Image: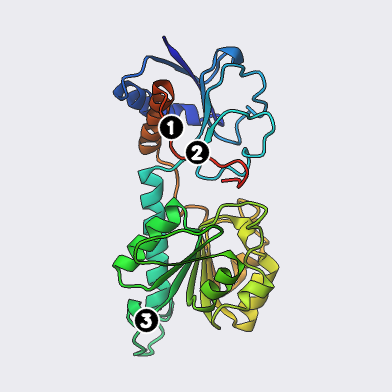
Amino acid sequence: MTINILFAAKSGRWETYQGPLTDALEEAGLDFDLRPDFPPEQVDYIVYAPNSSVQDFGPFTNLKAVLNLWAGVEDVVHNDTLTVPLARMVDHGLTQGMIEWVTGHVLRHHLGMDTHINGQDGQWRTQVPPLAQDRPVTILGMGALGQACAAALTALGFFVTGWSRSEKAVPQVTTLHGTDGLQSALRTAQILVLLLPNTPATTDILNAETLAQLPRGAVVINPGRGPLIDDTALLTALDSGQVGHATLDVFRTEPLPADHPFWAHPKVTVTPHIASATREDTASEVIAENIRRGEAGEPFLHLVDRTLGY
């Protein structure tokens, strides 16, 4: 029996995904019909971007699952019309991209590279950075991306502390959880990396109170979600020297408005939400595998816990 798959995303994405998705579905041995338009009652699966025109799932009466193209699900997880399983995107390409971006910026700040890149003024600066083993790094968020980045950093010799809302065990990483665990994780973080999902419980998790718990001069790196940080509190901490630098890839409003103080602040590096992205070829393989699982009666990969919001 043919599986009807609706591709629901913004205009232009169909052209980039049609080929890779078709190839992956064929490789999985599925009999399918993949289109960007279907009568709702005929759809079995939706390959989904939360900014698509599909916002009411009620008419999709035979829907088996929604397969998100994004790692973040905050824009769909609370949709009351969505009653079928929702899977978020976890794929090798997205994970590897995040590992490379996070590792690169952690090393940049650890080695003090900005001083030499920006300081070509004739001064012979001889300050030697500590070894990685003497530079504590904390990662807030021990999901798939947080664990992958922690593994890469520990392989380089960094002492990594990981924090998550619920208790987790990660090899070679000191793992903490809960309110008391958050305070301990922040207290040692000379470099802090934010990889938490955006939920009501994580909004403004980095605020005036928590920023004050960091070692003075700590570096903040945020490739996670913009609302994790209270922007005003961060700017105040930067101006006071409590935070030495902030490298930010995500923001509450994107693109970041041209008049936002982050652009002109000498202690802020802005990157335009490029830390990682879903790659069409690897993402298509994940989607095809989940559809194969659904048809075989096997558990879906990367299911979202609707009560937690991720």
| The N terminus lies in quadrant | top left
Along the viewing direction, whichever of 85 and 210 lies nearer the viewer? 85
User: Residue at image x 52%, y 21%?
Assistant: 36
The residue pinned by badge 2 equals 303
Question: Viewer-nearest of labels 3 and 2?
Answer: 2
Residue displayed at 39% across by 28% down: 288
* Cα distance between the residues tagged 1 and 2: 9 Å
Q: Which is more toward the observer, 227 or 125?
A: 227
Residue drawn 39% across the image and 32% down it: 284
Which residue position holds label 1? 299
Question: Going by the image, does 226 lie left or right of 6?
Answer: right
Looking at the image, do the residues carrying marks 1 and 2 touch, with CB atoms under 8 Å apart?
yes
**Numbered label attached to residue 275:** none
| Amino acid of disc 2 | Leu
Task: Name the residue tied to disc 3.
Answer: 134
Counting residues from the start of the chain, the first of labels 1 and 3 encountered is 3
Question: Where in the figure is residue 174, as x and y percent of width and height?
Answer: 42, 69
Could you tell me which secondary element the residue under label 2 belongs to? loop
Is the Cβ of the residue at disc 1 closer than 8 Å to that at disc 3? no
Question: Is 152 placed left or right of 138 in the picture?
Answer: left
Q: Is residue 233 visible?
A: yes
